[in-house]
Image: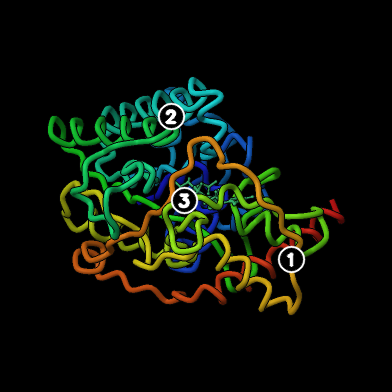
Amino acid sequence: MTVLVSGGAGYIGSHLCWLLADQGEEFVVVDNLSTGREFAIPPQGDLIVGDVGDIELIANVIKQHNVDAVVHFAGSIVVPESVSDPLKYYKNNTANSRNLIEVCVENGVKHFIFSSTATVYGEPKKNPVTEDFPFAPFNPYGTSKVMTEMMLKDVAFAHDFDYVALRYFNVAGADPKKRTGQSTPNATHLLKIANQVALGQREYLEIFGEDYDTPDGTGVRDYIHVSDLAEAHWSALQYLRSGGEAIALNCGYGKGFSVREVIETLEQVIGRKLPVKTGPRRPGDIGSIIADNTKIKSLLGWEPKYDDLKGIVESALRWEEALAQKNSQD
Ligand code: UD1
């Protein structure tokens, strides 16, 4: 039995690959390396460079590697880009997922874990959000993920196929063993950019909006350590393999931190002030979103190990330092 990890060279995908390698699980990565990095994949797994929407390629991988489960990370994730280039998101996220799901159904792959997002809820009327909140995506990125969740639901109803859609809140931090981390060139994540400023790679951090309806006016998010998120995928895999039914689950800690609080935490870690400017709201952004994680805890027995903003910030910074060294050697 082999797990096919689409987007396994990417940020979250590579953390799952290391976890699978640690567990002695067979896995194969399909990644087009558009944003992923080959060095991020553990040596135990093969890398096939290609597109997840390539039906023939994926069918061959499934047959050759005896794949029983697919974990589908590959896709585009930058909210403002989805506003300016929606068709890219409907192709990379929705159309490619449709092809991948079809190949699974046709080749008897019954277990599918999907990287969904808190963005499916849009701007929630209240926090924390539970999984039964209605879909209300606020940008094409969110809509592209909602469409995939809807396809999965229909396919699970029609075929011998089950899935877990994991709705990620704000993923941050890096592997404590420093084997992988956020390595995407031009990544737009708050903590990534803040760390680049801390390391002198950027001049300043811009805060996108201070007029949100939040305690300090800046955006509030639920930051989850990427290693806890990888564990959630591992638990979801056991759940599906033992006959679990199709489900969507929030992945977050149930705690919100503002942009200013994240900056202050990083300032504590580095012991100095960060150069910060304030600017207008970013297109597609919302004010506040926090997870209710009751369901994933009860259903999968998932328990966070790294629920500590300072630890998340530190691990991300340590990775950014390691990455700068790696990039300078390339
Ligand atoms: C992130 C994810 C998205 C996921 C969502 C779930 C990325 C690129 N996107 O979006 O896939 O679905 O969480 O909640 O990780 N900010 C600044 N200055 C910056 C960068 C960010 O002020 O330079 C602010 C943003 O306005 C926002 C917060 O920081 O309030 C977090 O932004 P970001 O890290 O980009 O993530 P999201 O947009 O929340």
- Residue underneath mark 3: 212
Closer to the N terminus: mark 1 or mark 3? 3
Left or right of residue 177: residue 215? left
Question: What's the residue at 70%, 62% (across, down)?
Answer: 195
Inspect this view and state whether residue 43 appears. Answer: no
Secondary structure beneath dot 2 equals: helix
In front: label 3 or label 2? 3
Q: Is residue 17 above or below residue 70?
A: below
- Callout 3: few (<14), some (14-19), or many (20+) C-alpha neighbours within 10 Å? some
Percent of width and height locating residue 36:
62, 44
Question: What's the residue at 59%, 58% (across, down)?
Answer: 42
Q: Nearer the viewer, residue 1 or 13?
A: 13
- Residue underneath mark 2: 140
The kind of residue tagged 3 is: Tyr
Q: Is residue 129 above or below residue 266?
A: above
In front: label 1 or label 3? 3
Quadrant of residue 48 within the rendered picture: top right
Left or right of residue 292: residue 226? right
- Callout 2: few (<14), some (14-19), or many (20+) C-alpha neighbours within 10 Å? many
Question: What's the residue at 42%, 76% (across, down)?
Answer: 305
Q: CA distance from mark 1 to mark 3?
A: 22 Å
Is the residue marked 3 within 8 Å of ligand 1, measured from its CB? Answer: yes
Left or right of residue 185: residue 327? right
Secondary structure beneath dot 3 equals: loop
Inspect this view and state whether residue 160 appears. Answer: yes
